[in-house]
Image (tube, helix red, strand yellow):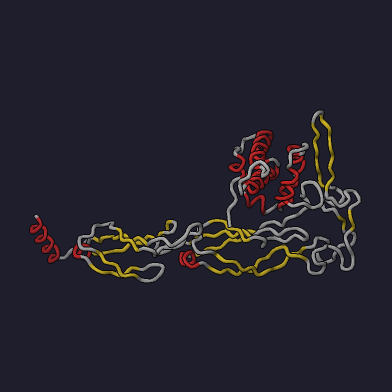
Amino acid sequence: MAAKRDYYEVLGVSKTSSTDEIKKQYRKLALKFHPDRNKSSDASEHFKEISEAYAVLSDPEKKQLYDQHGHEGVDGRYSSEDIFQGARGDFSDIFGRGGGGFDSIFESIFGRGGGGFGFNQQRGSDILYETSVTLEDVLHGKKMEIDLEKQVQCDNCNGSGCKPGTNKKTCSTCNGQGQVRQTRNMGFASFVTAAPCSTCNGQGSIIETPCNECNGQGKKKGNKKITFEIPPGIDSGDYTVPNEGNEVPEGSNGDLIVRVRVQPHLKFKRDGKDIFYDQDVSMIDATLGCDIIVPTLHGNEKIKVDSGSQPNTIIKLKGKGVTHINSRGKGDQYVRIVVNIPKKLSKHQKKLLEEFKKDSD
C-alpha cells in the first residue's frame, strides 16, 4: 500500500505556474519516462503518475478542488475515467503526431477500449477508510474485517445495465469505438484529436431498455464484507487494498485506501524498528546496582543495573523492538535509566548522606 505523491511535486511545478508551463513540463517529463525511451522497470509507473497529475492540474475545476482538499477532494468526486476526461484532447495534441509511439504506451498503461487511447475503459472511484492500530498491532500485524458500503455490480442485470432479456446496441456514431477522432494537417505535421462520443458518452454502446433496479447504471449501492491484513511494522499513513473500491461494470474496480494511525503507547515510544522505555531507579539502586524487571512488547525482561549507573544510562535489549514494513528483522528496545532524587529526607537520612559526603571528600 502506497500513498500518492503531491501532484505539484510530481510535475515539478508550483501552484502559480500557468497552464502553458504545466503543459510544457508535462511533455518534458513524459518524453523522459516514455517506456520506449526509458528502459527502467518503473518508467511506466512514472509515466502514469505524471499523466494523472497533468490531467488534474491542467483542468481548472479539478485543480481548484485539489488545491482546496488535496487528493481526497479529487478522488472523492471523480473516478479515474473522469480525471482523464478533460485531458484527452491535450494528450492527443501533445503526442498525436505520427511516429511518436505514445498511442501504444497509453493503451498498455490505461487500457484500450476499442480505439484511441482507451479512455472508455472505466475505473471505479477509490474509497477512503480510516482506522487506528496499537503498537502491539505494529508488532504482530492485525487482520481486519469491515462492512463497507460501496457501489457494487447490480445482480438483477449482472452489471450490463440492460433489462434482463435485452442487450446493448452498438453506437452508430462511433461504431463502438467510444470516441470520435479528427486529424488536422498543419503543414509538415498532422495533429490528431480524440473526443468522447457524445451519442453514447464514450461507452461505445447504447442501452435502449435499462434495468429497472439500477436505471441502466449496471451498479447500485450495497454492502460488502472486506477482509485485509494490517502487516507487521506498519507506520501511520495511507495504504492501498487493490480492487476493493467502488465497482464499475465492464471496467476495473477502484481501490480501498486505508488510512492508518498508530496510537501513542502509554509506556513505549517508537522510532522505526526501535522501542524506547524509561525505567525509574532510586538513587540507592543506581549507586549500589540492582536487578530489575522491565516490560517489553514481547513480555517482561530482567536487566542488570550496574553499580554507579549515571542518570540517562542506556541499556540495550537486542531484538526486543518491532519489525518495519520496508526492512528485515526486528529492532531493539532501549531502556533509559531515570535516577530518582528524593525531594524530602528525614533527619536520619540527611545525617547518613552528610556522613557519606564527609567520607567522600
In the image, residue 115 lies at what x, y percent? Answer: 81, 48
The number of numbered discs placed on residues in the rendered structure image is 0
User: Which of the 4 image quarters holds residue 94?
Assistant: top right
In the image, residue 357 lies at what x, y percent? Answer: 11, 58
Residue toward you, 109 or 292:
109
Residue toward you, 293 or 110:
110
In the displayed structure image, the side of residue 262 where residue 250 appears, left or right: right
From this viewpoint, which residue is outermost toward the top?
Answer: 187
In the image, residue 190 lies at what x, y percent? Answer: 81, 34
Residue toward you, 163 or 342:
163
In the image, residue 262 lies at what x, y percent? Answer: 49, 61
Q: Residue visible at 86% across and 62% down? A: 210
Quarter holding the N terminus?
Answer: bottom right
Quarter holding the C terminus?
Answer: bottom left
Q: Residue visible at 80% across and 62% down? A: 218
Is residue 56 visible from the viewing direction of this image? no
User: Which of the 4 image quarters holds residue 152?
Assistant: bottom right
From this viewpoint, which residue is outermost toward the right?
Answer: 172
In the displayed structure image, the side of residue 341 where residue 325 appears, left or right: right
Residue toward you, 326 or 15:
326
Is residue 41 visible from the viewing direction of this image? yes
Image height check: is 132 above or below 19? below
